[in-house]
Amino acid sequence: MEVVVKKDYDEISKLAAKMIADVIKSKTKPVLGFPTGSTPIGTYKELIRLHKEEGLDWSKVSTFNLDEYVGLEPKHDQSCYYFMWENLFKHINIRKESIHAPNGVAKDIVAFCKWYEDEIIKTGGIDVQLLGIGGNGHIAFNEPGSSLGSRTRIKTLAKETIKDNARFFKTSDEVPKYAITMGIGTIIEARELILLANKETKADAISKAIEGPITAMVPATVVQMHPRTTIIVDKPAASKLTREYIAEPRVLKTTKTN
Ligand code: PGA
């Protein structure tokens, strides 16, 4: 596990985008896992810049999103799909059929979740999974108490998550109460994880995720078990860490593998 502490949001976003771009360039059929939320927006902006100004090619890339609110159509302006379309996909040359996201209006959610898991495997598995972290330590919508071995399924959102996300809706009553989320067991099968966090509001969750004991009560602690995890945080998010951490990740030499 590598913990990289950067000066600010701009620096964490640029580093995460560079690491993702390196994966895209090193694979013939790259498979990327993406989160929504405010944290990855800077990374997506930089990935768009790399496409527009440096020709980063997305034509062979497949993506899987972490989660979606139950009851929201992809066209709903607060759906995770809409967020991804507006903040990344519509700006790059990805094939629409290579974009995968949980279907919040699936008639049979259990069957859909199984299909989603199978699709990840059929596509070759996720090469790199980008993650944010909730103030309560969740990853995707795996709230505290989620099994560390959980698979894609429906989850009830925690009160704190509904409160945190109310800023995107007119009132907190409009925030959906359920979501479909990749499980923690699904997430840690990705070949590489990048966990991003900025702002002091994440300092507590980051300190527990990195320096605390592994526990289902802080789902992000599971990244400690993954052999290739990079946690990239800005100084405010790192403010409760007690050990010294590096400012640059080691250079990973990658070769074309699929
Ligand atoms: P945020 O959310 O990026 O909007 O802070 C992260 C999360 O809840 O996982």
Image (tube, rainbow, N blue to C red):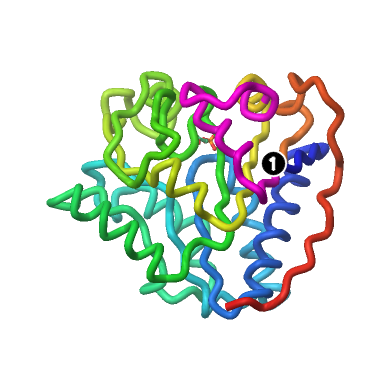
- Vertical side of 187 occupied by 167: above or below: above
Location of residue 139 in the rendering, given as x and y in whole percent from the top left corner: 49, 36
- Vertical side of 76 occupied by 246: above or below: above
Instruction: Decide if ligand 1 comes within 8 Å of the CB at mark 1.
Output: no
- Vertical side of 46 occupied by 212: above or below: above
Categorize mark 1 by other alpha carbons within 10 Å: few (<14), some (14-19), many (20+).
many
Residue at the spot x=42%, y=20% of the render? Answer: 160
Location of residue 138 in the rendering, given as x and y in whole percent from the top left corner: 48, 31
Q: Nearer the viewer, residue 229 or 49?
A: 229
Answer with left or right where residue 113 lies relative to residue 240: left
The amino acid marked with disc number 1 is Ile
Q: Is residue 31 magenta?
A: no
Quadrant of the rendered image containing residue 184 = top left
Q: In what element is the residue under mark 1? A: strand
Q: Is residue 221 magenta?
A: yes
User: Label 1 belongs to which residue?
Assistant: 231
